[in-house]
């Protein structure tokens, strides 16, 4: 199958990008590669520090897949060498260095997850320890001589720390050079990264030029907003959708996003074109399509990517059954009443929720009760004590359920 035209490739690549530096360079490189009959080499680096991926990580992975779909080579670079340094990008403190055991364990978990999106046969997996570990002290000094401290201190987080008097260690200054050297060794035509990596990617352009290579094109992807629509998707904030979560959980979480955020997810997490997304907006605005149906379609698409169409269909039906029709989940977990939650007055609901994992703690359970987020046997309750002697309790807190045998 012939490769799309240069204009078509650029349009496909630009969809969902935050920035492309520079488009005219990319055009020239695509034309040159076409003449030479070779694919572009597209490098993306991952430091294996948080191997449980969520949808925020997949924005970058999807862009990698777009390059693969256009016939180009994607290099999935696992930073086993740089992971031992600690990268402060986007932080005002350094990232703790990792042990070799942690790196190898996390790298394997990455590999298991990324091929849910990437084409395994079109992915070149490399480890930068292969060349970084072999550098002699003399080589490191020569590399450091190719960039100035003044240029390194232009990076926003370094400049801010310098103004505030926060220490900056020498190893942090070496990190962008190590990442740039990766591009030299791999002869990267393009490097992809999040917007928080822009400075490091630009250093790669300069170092490649100094080594006599054409400078790589830099393409950054935006940071995806989490389910709250405000903060960056993050496990620590609880506003994430994990790609290994069960289909029903993923589907229900995606159905909680706002109508406004839905279109952002369509753009960054699906392969629909901008034209198709614009038509979706028009259909909703005209009343031809209900926003709920558009959101159902979005959730089905995303769950299909990670669990398959059959599982996505079951998740959609479960959502309809539980949420839209108010029925109890078919796979509701049944447990016995935990010890220590009953006293002479009855069952302490706050303690029960905490023991069942429906709240993070007893105090969190109290907050949920006061907020009206707890239903027991189909009725909303704010009571701290439940006078129940025997039978069963079907408890719902948000989208989580438990059946308790009393």
Image: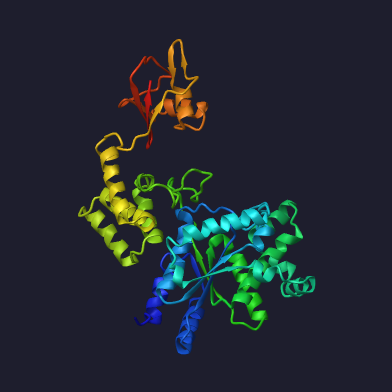
Can you say whether 174 is above or below 289 in the image? below
Can you say whether 341 is above or below 156 in the image? above
Instruction: State the residue at coordinates (34%, 81%).
Output: 1
What is the image's colouring? rainbow
Residue 379 or residue 242, whichever sits in front? 242
Give the number of marks.
Answer: 0
Q: Can I make out residue 224 in this image? A: no
Residue 273 or residue 348, whichever sits in front? 348
Q: Can I make out residue 76 in this image? A: yes
Residue 152 or residue 70, whichever sits in front? 70
Location of residue 371 in the rendering, given as x and y in whole percent from the top left corner = 42, 29
Location of residue 81 in the rendering, given as x and y in whole percent from the top left corner = 66, 64
Location of residue 159 in the rendering, given as x and y in whole percent from the top left corner = 69, 59
* Residue at the limit of the structure toward the top, as seen here: 344
Q: Quadrant of residue 256?
A: top left
Can you say whether 210 is above or below 224 in the image? below
* Residue at the limit of the structure toward the bottom, as seen here: 35
Instruction: State the residue at coordinates (38%, 20%).
Output: 406
Q: Quadrant of residue 213?
A: bottom right
* Residue at the limit of the structure toward the left, as seen here: 288
Location of residue 41 in the rendering, given as x and y in whole percent from the top left corner = 52, 76
* Residue at the limit of the structure toward the right, as seen here: 138
């Amino acid at each position: 199958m012939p490769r799309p035209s240069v204009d078509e490739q650029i349009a496909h690549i630009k969809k969902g990008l935050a920035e492309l530096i520079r488009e005219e360079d990319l055009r020239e490189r695509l034309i040159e590669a076409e003449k030479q009959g070779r694919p572009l080499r597209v490098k993306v680096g991952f430091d294996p520090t948080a191997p449980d991926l969520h949808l925020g990580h997949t924005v970058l992975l999807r862009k990698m897949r777009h390059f693969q779909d256009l016939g180009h080579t994607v290099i999935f670079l696992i930073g086993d060498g740089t992971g031992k340094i600690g990268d402060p990008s986007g932080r005002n403190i350094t990232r703790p260095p990792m042990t070799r055991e942690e790196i190898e364990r996390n790298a394997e978990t990455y590999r298991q997850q990324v091929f849910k999106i990437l084409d395994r046969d079109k992915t070149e997996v490399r480890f930068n320890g292969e060349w970084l570990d072999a550098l002699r002290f003399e080589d490191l000094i020569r590399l450091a001589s190719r960039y100035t401290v003044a240029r390194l201190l232009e990076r926003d987080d370094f400049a801010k720390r310098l103004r505030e008097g926060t220490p900056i260690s020498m190893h942090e200054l070496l990190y962008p050079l190590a990442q740039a050297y990766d591009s030299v060794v791999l002869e990267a035509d393009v490097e992809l990264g999040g917007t928080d990596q822009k400075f490091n990617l630009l250093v790669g352009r300069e170092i490649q030029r100094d080594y006599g290579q054409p400078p790589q094109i830099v393409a950054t992807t935006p940071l995806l907003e989490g389910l709250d629509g405000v903060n960056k998707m993050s496990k620590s904030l609880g506003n994430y959708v994990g790609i290994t979560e069960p289909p029903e959980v993923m589907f229900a979480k995606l159905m909680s996003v706002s109508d406004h955020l839905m279109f952002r997810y369509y753009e960054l997490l699906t392969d629909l074109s901008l034209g198709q997304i614009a038509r979706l907006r028009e259909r909703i605005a005209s009343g031809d399509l209900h926003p709920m149906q558009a959101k159902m379609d979005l959730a089905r698409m995303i769950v299909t990517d990670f669990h398959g169409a059959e599982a996505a269909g079951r998740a959609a039906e479960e959502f309809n059954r539980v949420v839209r029709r108010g029925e109890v989940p078919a796979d509701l977990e049944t447990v016995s009443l935990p010890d220590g939650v009953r006293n002479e007055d009855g069952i302490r609901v706050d303690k029960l929720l905490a023991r069942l994992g429906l709240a993070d703690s007893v105090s969190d359970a109290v907050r949920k009760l006061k907020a009206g987020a707890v239903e027991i046997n189909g009725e909303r309750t704010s009571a701290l004590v439940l006078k129940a002697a025997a039978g069963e309790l079907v408890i719902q807190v948000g989208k989580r359920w438990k059946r308790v045998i009393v």
